[in-house]
Amino acid sequence: MRLILLFLDGYPVLVPEEEYRYDKSHGAYYPLNPNFNGKIGPPSIKTVRFVPMHQAIFQKYCIMSSVRFELEYYFLFCKNKAGKESFLIIKVKPGSLRDLKANGLILTKKIVVTAGKVCLGETTPEECTIALFNKYKSCIRFSFKQDLPRSYMLNFFNDRGELFYTQYQSTYLSHTKINVSDNDLSYIMKF
């Protein structure tokens, strides 16, 4: 996987590297598709946290999933133009890897769990994924129709599709939400 983080109309997007050309004289990427109608440029004020990852190429990743989850969690790793390492944790529907590699993804608030700087150094992406999960697991939320805490078996896969770690994790009730249009009650659970 080789995805570049760019800003399209001010919003962060991950795009396949082979769909864009880098112009060294302007220090910018340009789409190879002549029918592309978005404007690649600077971030908006709402997306300033992605600025350190601008034009970074994400090559390494790990996936955390559970057979009982409606989403998979991708831990993506990159280096920016200055050589600084960063990570991005996103949540997508199971089986989305092929689409992600082929089409990229718009990074909305609903998709991004968290992002930040990381120093892999001698650490493998697998080891870093476990450390990041344990540090940021409280950012992961689930919506259920019942308020019963549950335990989940979490499986961690590397970018070769190999299972490298399994962890059991319990949830607890964080808060409730009521949909005002239909009075539907949801229980928001966290690790």
Image: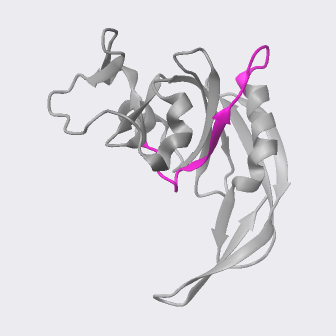
Give the residues drawn in magenta, as a range. 106-125
From the top left corner, tell me how far across and down residue 155 is, in percent.
73, 42
Q: Main secondary structure of the magenta part?
A: loop
Q: Nearer the viewer, residue 100 or 135?
A: 135
Q: Classify residue 63 by image quadrant.
A: top right
Viewer-proximal residue among 31 and 73? 31
Q: Is residue 8 magenta?
A: no
Residue 75 seen in render? no
Position of 137 relative to 181 (above/below): above
What residue is drawn where x is 36% and y is 35%? 103
Whole-percent x, y for residue 110 in the image: 52, 56
Q: How many marks?
A: 0
Q: Quadrant of residue 151?
A: bottom right
Q: Residue at x 75, y 20 (%)?
A: 124
**Percent x, y for residue 145?**
65, 78
| Residue nearest the observer in this picture, 161 or 146 | 146
In this image, 187 relative to 100: left or right? right
| Residue at point 76%, 70% (across, down) | 174
Residue 122 position (above or below residue 67): above
Does the magenta segment cover residue 112?
Answer: yes
Residue found at the very far left of the displayed protein = 35
Residue drawn 40% across and 36% down? Answer: 104
